[in-house]
Image (spheres, rainbow, N blue to C red):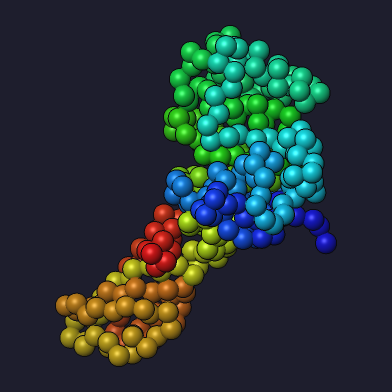
């Protein structure tokens, strides 16, 4: 059985009496993009800092690429492409000088890869990092994380400051990493970007992982609003519709019904079809809807 690229067991971080992260269990396979979702302050950055060996767990264990994040953090730092949420680089260096410095720390990287990334993100290598806009500093951070073509990227809010065109370019880059068999751990509160690329998502709330699921499976199980219109003169079959599997809410309206359906609509449509339904309207579910549903349900 293939070892998980990221494996945590009971990973916990306490600051005094405050538990910033509690009993995190994760197993992320190779060749996937994992979206780590939660609002600011939910424990996402704490998780990442422990995965990178920057802070020590209060309890539990974590391995990254097979290396213990406490005992072998130097190997984690060398092997992982890491972009912190507060990346600034060395402000006194130009972008080119900084990338050369990081390259030397890693024992050298292929200059052709660096050149390709620099061109792709339109990065000015001559400009000092301290004089750059936040978005351009973020581009430097992305290039330094990706330029050694690591087997694992760990990214904390990576698109902050990027314009929409660069965001799209960056998400394309993540897909290319995955298609090459590499793994991406993407922490974000921007739900649309996670939905666009993630294979699996985890939702963290108040330091606890409250669910993990494949994006497709999450959508399949989600609640959606459905409007049914019946043939004129047909009474709305409220009892039959309410009894259909997945229906959690129904309001009869003039000539039809408005419903909330959880999961598949197959049973609802099977029940409604012979009862005079002539139109069905279903709202598509996106990840933001799912996220809000989950948070509202757990509030």
- Left or right of 298: which side holds 48? right
Q: Nearer the viewer, residue 186 or 91?
A: 91
User: Residue 235, relative to residue 79: is it above or below?
Assistant: below
User: Residue 160, relative to residue 255: is it above or below?
Assistant: above
Q: Nearer the viewer, residue 282 or 11?
A: 11
- Left or right of 164: which side holds 86? right
Q: Residue at x 22, y 80 (%)?
A: 252
Q: Nearer the viewer, residue 203 or 12?
A: 12
Q: Residue at x 79, y 41 (%)?
A: 72
Q: Residue 285: in sight, yes or no?
A: no
Q: Position of residue 258 (x, y in %)?
A: 27, 74
Query: Residue extending furthest top?
Result: 126
In the rendered image, the quadrant that contains the N terminus is: bottom right
Query: Residue extending furthest front?
Result: 16
Q: Residue at x 54, y 59 (%)?
A: 208
Q: Position of residue 15 (x, y in %)?
A: 55, 48
Q: Splitting the image into 4 quarters, where does residue 2 fall?
A: bottom right
Q: Splitting the image into 4 quarters, where does residue 89 fall?
A: top right
Q: Residue at x 67, y 45 (%)?
A: 56
Please tell me how many numbered marks the rendered image carries.
Answer: 0
Query: Residue extending furthest bottom?
Result: 239
Q: Position of residue 288 (x, y in %)?
A: 41, 54
């Amino acid at each position: 059985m293939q070892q998980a690229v990221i494996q945590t067991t009971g990973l916990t971080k306490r600051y005094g009496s405050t538990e910033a992260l509690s009993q995190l269990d994760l197993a992320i396979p190779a060749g996937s993009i994992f979206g780590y979702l939660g609002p600011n302050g939910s424990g996402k950055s704490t998780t990442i800092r422990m995965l990178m060996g920057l802070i020590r767990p209060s309890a539990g264990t974590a391995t990254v690429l097979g290396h213990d994040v406490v005992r072998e953090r130097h190997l984690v730092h060398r092997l992982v492409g890491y972009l912190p949420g507060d990346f600034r680089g060395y402000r006194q260096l130009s972008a080119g000088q900084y990338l050369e410095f990081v390259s030397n720390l890693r024992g050298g990287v292929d200059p052709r890869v660096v050149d390709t990334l620099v061109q792709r993100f339109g990065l000015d290598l001559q400009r000092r990092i301290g004089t750059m806009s936040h978005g351009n500093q973020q581009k430097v951070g992305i290039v330094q994380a990706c330029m050694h073509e690591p087997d694992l990227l760990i990214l904390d809010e990576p698109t902050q400051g990027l314009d929409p065109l660069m965001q799209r370019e960056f998400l394309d880059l993540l897909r290319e990493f995955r298609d090459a068999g590499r793994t991406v751990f993407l922490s974000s509160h921007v739900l649309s970007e996670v939905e666009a690329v993630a294979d699996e998502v985890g939702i963290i709330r108040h330091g606890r992982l409250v669910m993990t699921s494949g994006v497709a499976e999450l959508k399949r199980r989600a609640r959606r609003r459905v409007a049914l219109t019946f043939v004129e003169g047909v009474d709305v079959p409220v009892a039959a519709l309410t009894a259909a599997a997945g229906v959690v809410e129904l309001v009869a309206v003039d000539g039809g019904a408005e419903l909330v359906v959880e999961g598949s609509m197959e049973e609802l449509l099977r029940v409604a079809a012979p009862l005079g339904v002539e139109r069905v309207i279903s709202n598509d579910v996106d990840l933001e809807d799912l996220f809000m549903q989950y948070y509202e349900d757990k509030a």
